[in-house]
């Protein structure tokens, strides 16, 4: 039996209640919806890494497993080329990945703003000259240039570094001097041409004004306050899985093209300067030889002129099937399908000009 006081309290509560309120138990609180994050999918990187393992295993141990299939010389050549390109490039890719991760984790973004001129047109030649500090090949320069972009460096300057680093570093110039003994003009011509190509492409990127539509800018995958060692570890793992997979694709393509292209027809085109320069430039694209070793291959092509062999050494470190694959995976296909042809044309024209001047 309720008391008058309890009845009054109940009537007062009903009078103040919202008549539009739903009847029944209160709804369970729902978790706040999280905005979808733009994450870089790991699936393609893992798939390419598995491809690396499978292809290397087939190249190394496939003869024992499929002995009947490895009796053909072409297949043996393919296996040798694939393993050679992969093994030769992998240490420099690891070097680039380590340097890229170190730049991301330990170097503040303000450092690059202070190190390079503020005007993009002036930053391009400075970035080109700084390529001399990286003793690696094109496999190393791709992740490093991506890290530079991610740290605030203008894409034109990072592209200039991307092109100059594998071509004018001391290791490459020293190997060129050894491959062409007593011919210092070849070393000078290679350095001047490669440096000119890197600066021209950087300035062309600025002049077009459309680079932002073509380039997939690398994204900062780490939140503020993440420990530096964790940033280093995750950056190194991501870049290696991502770039290593595309390196495998490029190495397989280079090995396939090396087997398919006949060698006898080279003698027929060596007599024409323009044709020989274009042919050796295309051959450099297809063979995808590491920049530390391409001078020895060029020196062996004695039927060609020094200008044609200069084009071979200039084109190889900046545009080949392996590098195109790496650029596609890092900067996107829109960038690669425009950048590779432009780089090839500028490299051929620059080689002809410098060869006419110095060689």
Image: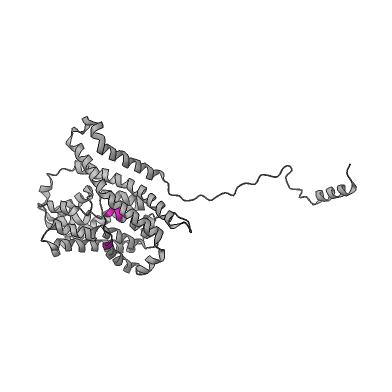
Q: Estimate the x, y position of residue 241 in percent, counting from the top left.
A: 36, 47
- 29 vs 118, left or right, is right
Q: Is residue 55 above or below residue 143?
A: above
Can residue 200 be seen here?
no
Q: Estimate the x, y position of residue 309 in percent, counting from the top left.
A: 15, 55
Can residue 109 be seen here?
yes
Query: Total of numbered circles in the picture?
Result: 0
Q: Estimate the x, y position of residue 242 in percent, counting from the top left.
A: 36, 48
Q: Estimate the x, y position of residue 76 in percent, counting from the top left.
A: 20, 38
Q: Quadrant of the N terminus?
A: top right
SS assignment for the magenta stretch, majority = helix
Is 114 within the magenta? no
Rendered residue at 17%/36% (across/down): 73
Residue 214, quarter of the rendered image: bottom left
Is 138 within the magenta? yes
Rendered residue at 33%/45% (across/down): 245
Q: Closer to the camera, 242 or 349?
A: 242
Q: Is residue 312 above or below residue 117?
A: above
Q: Quadrant of the C terminus?
A: bottom left
Segment colored magenta: 131-140
Residue 142, quarter of the rendered image: bottom left
């Amino acid at each position: 039996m309720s008391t008058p006081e309890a009845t009054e309290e109940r009537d007062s509560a009903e009078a103040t209640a919202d008549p539009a309120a739903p009847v029944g138990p209160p709804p369970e609180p729902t978790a706040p919806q999280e905005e979808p994050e733009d994450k870089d999918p790991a699936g393609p990187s893992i798939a390419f890494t598995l491809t690396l393992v499978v292809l290397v295993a087939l190249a190394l141990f496939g003869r024992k497993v499929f002995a009947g299939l490895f009796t053909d010389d072409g297949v043996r050549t393919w296996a040798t080329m694939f393993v050679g390109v992969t093994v030769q490039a992998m240490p420099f890719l690891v070097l680039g990945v380590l340097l890229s991760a170190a730049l991301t984790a330990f170097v503040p973004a303000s450092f690059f703003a202070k190190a390079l001129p503020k005007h993009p047109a002036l930053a391009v030649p400075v970035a080109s000259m700084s390529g001399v500090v990286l003793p690696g090949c094109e496999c190393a320069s791709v992740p490093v240039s991506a890290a530079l972009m991610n740290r605030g460096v203008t894409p034109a300057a990072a592209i200039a570094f991307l092109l100059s680093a594998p071509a004018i570093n001391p290791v490459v110039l020293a190997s060129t001097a050894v491959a062409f003994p007593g011919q210092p003009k070849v070393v000078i011509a290679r350095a001047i041409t490669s440096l000119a190509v890197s600066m021209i492409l950087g300035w062309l990127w600025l002049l077009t004004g459309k680079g932002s539509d073509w380039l997939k800018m690398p994204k900062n995958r780490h939140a503020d306050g993440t420990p530096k060692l964790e940033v280093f570890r995750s950056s190194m793992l991501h870049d290696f899985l991502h770039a290593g997979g595309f390196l495998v694709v490029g190495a397989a393509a280079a090995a396939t093209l090396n087997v398919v292209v006949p060698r006898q027809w080279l003698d027929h085109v060596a007599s024409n300067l323009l044709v020989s320069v274009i042919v050796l430039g295309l051959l450099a694209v297809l063979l995808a030889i590491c920049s530390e070793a391409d001078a020895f291959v060029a020196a062996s092509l004695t039927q060609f002129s020094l200008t044609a062999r200069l084009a071979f050494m200039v084109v190889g470190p900046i545009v080949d099937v392996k590098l195109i694959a790496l650029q596609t995976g890092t900067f996107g296909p829109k960038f690669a399908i425009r950048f590779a042809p432009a780089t090839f044309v500028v490299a051929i024209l620059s080689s002809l000009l410098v060869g006419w001047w110095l060689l």
